[in-house]
Image (cartoon, grey):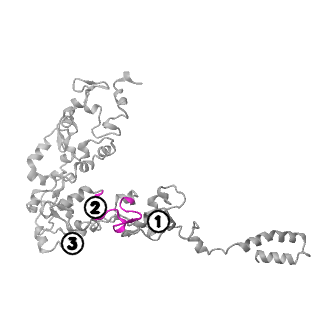
Amino acid sequence: MNARTLVLLAAALLPAAPAWAQAQAQKAKPAAKAAAKAKPAAPAAASGSNPKKLLPGAAGKVCLECHGDFEERLKKASVHSPVRTGDCIGCHNPHTSDHGKLLSASKNEVCATCHGSVVPAGAKSTHKPVTDNNCNLCHDPHASPYKANLIKDGNDLCASCHKTVVEAAASAKFKHSPVQKGCTTCHQPHGAASADLLKRDVPGLCLGCHKIESPILAKKHLNYPVKNARCTTCHDPHGSNQRGMFLNTVHPPVAKGQCSMCHDAPTSKNPFKTRQAGADLCRTCHSTKMTAMLDRARVHQPVAEGACLACHGPHASKDKGLLKGNAVTVCGECHADTVRRQAVSVTKHQPIASGDCSSCHDAHGGAAPLFFKNANGIELCGQCHDWQKHSTHPIGEKVKDPRNRNLFLQCSSCHRAHGSEYKHMIPYPTTTAMCTNCHENYRR
């Protein structure tokens, strides 16, 4: 029974009704009037689809009255679905927000509401912009002339971060066809079940195009069964100036096709087995050099243990000396704390920043502590820094360190060669704090 019926019934019975009934009828009259004027309630589904109760067109069309530049954006080749359908409130709050651009959530949370599955489950590698939740680094959230709302086309976009790789591939004498077609021919842009964002692990990825058992390729590999070998130990997948797309530095036996100098014959039971183990194999060619290394007063541990392959690749490398990577990467395998210090240093030491640890250290060993190439620290730094012009502070063997009379003042007395969290690689927050460490009479 609705309110209006209740009022009519109460009115008919008023003469005989007790006082409480008359009071209830009087209370019901305003409710009945309000109910009569009220519009029919919207269906529950319709109400849920418009939680902000916006007028028709207010979700997007009205926005264009102020944001007229979006009319031109809508003409671009790739338009984000919410923009194309005029659903601005799909990403933005029309009134206020705790986030920039009136976004209804942080920019990456907004993207994840629709694109939450761009990284495959159990991914071994994830693209850094995705890890950093920085979708806008690659995509325009509204519209773009390129597919998938990318801010640049193809390899030009990848070059924004991977400039060295892209430029080297473009200038390579021998180019790899998939690279010219686009980086995404081999790599996934968001995340992958394989390392290095590869669509498949090597050699599986390579075998998709290269029929390794064909007579031509079999001959080039001297009939060694390389079907299960890692192609990138010899070849540069992005392009090379070496014929056969070899990496820049090739081990002479490999370059000359003399694999059997180190390995058993291709027809043997185990063709990839080396003729001798470890350093004994290297010694067959590098005997004089290895003997000289071991004769030094201080020997680097991998050298002492005969672990040449801890630092060097046996076939080919992008770096000199057949190093597995640049010196910072290779040295960082054991000296991660030192490399990390440089990474957080406010002032970068150029040799480390450029990956050239060998500017100061001999990687195999030496007579000086820490394998320094020159036992005199001042002269070592003087190879790059003219300290006499740089500073007038007295240094040298005749100048004792006030903090430790057993030491003399040198460059490392005030600077940390691998960097520090303060400017100029000094170990104190300010120059004053450093100087008054010795000159106590100037402390305040």
Q: Is residue 37 left or right of residue 438?
A: right
Q: Amino acid at mark 2?
A: Asp
Gap in Å between the C-alphas at discs 2 and 3?
24 Å
Q: Amino acid at mark 1?
A: Thr
Residue 17 colored magenta? no
In this view, the residue farthest toward the top is 441
Gap in Å between the C-alphas at discs 2 and 1?
28 Å
In the rendered image, residue 387, in percent from the top left (x then y), is placed at 22, 31
Mark 1 lies on residue: 113
Q: Residues within 10 Å of mark 2 (few under 14, many from 20)?
A: some
Quadrant where the image shows the C terminus:
top left
Gap in Å between the C-alphas at discs 3 and 1?
37 Å
Residue drawn at the location 90% of the way across and 72% of the way down: 18
In the rendered image, residue 396, in percent from the top left (x then y), is placed at 22, 27
Numbered mark located on residue 209 in the image: 3
Instruction: Relative to 295, say whether 315 is above or below.
Output: below
The part of the chain drawn in magenta is 136-160
Q: Amino acid at mark 3?
A: Cys
Q: Residues within 10 Å of mark 3 (few under 14, many from 20)?
A: few
Q: Is residue 279 left or right of residue 77?
A: left
Mark 2 lies on residue: 156
Residue drawn at the location 85% of the way across and 76% of the way down: 11
Q: Which comes sooner in the sequence, label 2 or label 1?
A: 1
Residue drawn at the location 81% of the way across and 68% of the way down: 27
Disc 1, SS: loop
Nearer to us in this view, 159 or 319: 159
Disc 2, SS: helix
Numbered mark located on residue 145 in the image: none
